[in-house]
Image: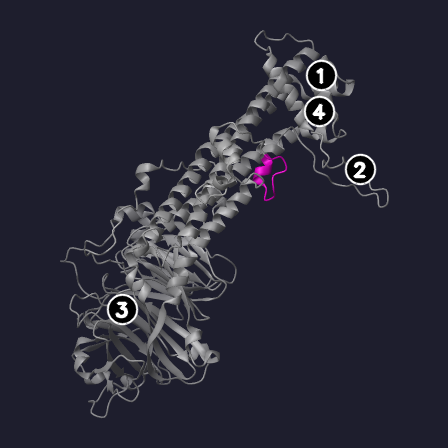
Amino acid sequence: MAQASSMKLLGSRNMSCIVERMEWNNKMDLIAYGTEKGEVIIQRLNWQKIVTFPTPGEDVRVRSLSWQMDETLLAVGYSNGKVALLDAESETIISGLIYEDDIKKVYFSKAITCKDNLWSYKCHSRDRHKRFLPKLQPLTNIDPCLKTLDQKSFPKGSPCFLVVIMRSGKVHLLLLGALQAGSIDLTQHVMHPEQFDVYDVRLNGDFNAIYALLRDGEQLKVLHFHNQVLQDSMEPMLELATYCAHILETKNYINDTLQCITEAWETVQFEMDNKLTKYANSQAYGMISAHFMELHVFGFATLDFEEFLYDTLTEKGFKKIANSVDLSLSNLQSLVFKQLNGAAVHMFYFMNTILGFGRIAHYFESLIVPEVANDAMRACGTFLMKVREMQRQIDSLVNAMKLFHSWMVFTILRLSHQEIPDDMVFTEEENARLIEFFHCMEPDSSDQETPPANDGENGSTIKVTRSKFNLERVGQYLENVNLTQPEETECSTLWDQILQENECLRNSRLVVPQDIDSSLIQQREKMFNAIDEVFHKPTESISGSFKLSSCVIIGDLPEFADENDDFVHCTYYVNESSDPDAKCDMLAVTVSWQEVVVLEFNPERCTLRCTRIQLQPGPFTIQLHEDYYNLRFVDLQFYNEQSLSMLAQTTTPTPGVRPHSYFVQFSLSSSRNQSTFHRLGPLVKLMDTTLTHSIHNNPEGVSFKGLDGVCEMLAVSGSRKVATVLSDRKRKMTIFEMENNDDEDDDTEMSQASFLEISKESVMAGDTEKSESI
């Protein structure tokens, strides 16, 4: 064990803010801490700041921090119910979740490793879509400020669970940060829900059970829930979660693409409103179409209309408008044809794959309902058809607008008696298309709204909607209302004729339906809702499979007191030893200011080892320093599977003497002979069957290190061999090196160069700060 006497001071610094949470990265020399302003700051061991993530809102506090195992991904839980996944290396917000309640804690589980055996499920198709589907093109023209928490890629790396614990007692499990892999409401399993508080909820090492440390009335309990679905379906869940992450990424990509399409379309409308639509709105409904038709057929129009054409617009001004409109329509065509169409194909492929999983009933019966997956796949197909339909409308509008622009230039040149180029000649087909364009510009319809008019009673103006140069045929697809001008369908292909003649085939679930009246936005919402229904099944199956198998009563608690007087602190560690007797899930919890209980659950043996230690000396303890008689626990964390790090404070300081703290390193192996064994059953009461031992009676297994000031928080990392303490009202951070590892090869450290590239401070400033701190 690493004795505390070997602690080497690396440096200390007065922070410019109050630090409320700290967490060391398991692999790299990175520490993340949350401030009282709700910011999350990540810095290196040499005090070099890497990145600062701003608060998600006013008066928002950081509740919990957790690094993904051996990755640069950090999960942050906020008091407003938000959970953000932050990437320290790319300095970006990966994704986010929003809940309706205050968050108690969030954490990443250890990496999931599934056992390979003859009967296990192996698909090997997680990245097969990269072979068959083209890569989605980046959206280079999207405004960076439009990026929100839920519009980024999802985390990659070792598969694991993200567990979100709410203060209300609800616990949510997310596999790969994407798939809602079940939830549980702990208040349904306690006897006194009105006197309830949850301290921590942890997944066990085999991912088939959870341990919930909570208050139930005046009792401190650990509830053990077993889950058969998690035990039997881990590999199928990983496959489903992988495709769930792909689908969520594609959802975000579709939303971003539609945002870009809307911006491009607004540009088209703005350019048309600049002159043409503004003049059209000043005329009575039907007159603009009549003026264009008259000018095209007879070669002349009213004096006001001719004056508008060659005096107000001019040839040069109209060409400028036409070029801008053509460019925006070209961008619109590209976004729909490439980005949106590609995303729709990806979505259809992923849902088709999930439907195929659902037909493997032996593995996916508890996770996928084939009928629901089939409905979602058909919704994806309908969305793809709607994208193609909008694409045809855009192509038609582009061709019509190009012809209209050429005719307008020709007309302006003719009316202004300028020379007309020889190539500006319209064919009979183009003339017919122009007449159709003018006729559809302001169509005659029984349900066409009346033109603007004044209300005779109150003098107010009635606002109506009117057609504007056929733009509605495309713009209607970007509104969340039914189409006002649906595409005219003709039986142009043999397949269309077969569907029209055969009602049974037309209504078959194997055929993707075509929704003629829905807009693109409506069809997107229908597709998203159908996909969400697919992922309700795993949530329901896993949530319903949680069964309370054991209740361990650790001790009694006083009535609810002020939050500052709460002495319950806990820490959890998963031992991954290959020895069945040593492979235990360990939980340490303070049951009073001077006593801590260490529980070691062995799931394979169904046994529980309990060790109770206290800071107070026992009846046979030798004479101690006077400070050791007045210590209380402040914080604790597992240093590794063999050691427990604790932070203690003096409680009755001598008048005129400043109180101080001690860092305590306790060896678990040295206390094995003082532990008690218990058989896990429906109810286990530890108060009557365990004895408390003084920590001072085992001098070889414990060591004390005096610290300056009153320290209030502790963060340790056995893999990094460092410890950090906060003192002076959480404003002074002190870092210690726990073991001298200069002669060892550290293959877990990230290279200095990679972090210097993403550092917010200069290299010179970082080196200067490091030398000053040491």
Q: Residues within 10 Å of mark 3 (few under 14, many from 20)?
A: many
Left or right, 321 with respect to 18, comes to right
Point out the residue furthest to the right here.
Answer: 457
Residue under label 2: 453
Residue 593, quarter of the rendered image: bottom left
Q: Range of the magenta residues? A: 475-486
Residue 338, quarter of the rendered image: top left
Cα separation between marks 2 and 1: 27 Å
The tag earlier along the polypeptide, 2 or 1, is 1
Do the residues bearing badges 3 and 1 touch, measured as CB atoms within 8 Å?
A: no
Type of residue at label 2? Ala
Cα separation between marks 4 and 3: 76 Å
Cα separation between marks 1 and 4: 10 Å
| Residue 361 place in picture, x, y as percent | 33, 55
Residue under label 4: 289
Q: Can residue 39 be seen in the rendering of this structure?
A: no
The tag earlier along the polypeptide, 3 or 1, is 1
The tag earlier along the polypeptide, 4 or 2, is 4
Point out the residue furthest to the bottom here.
Answer: 619
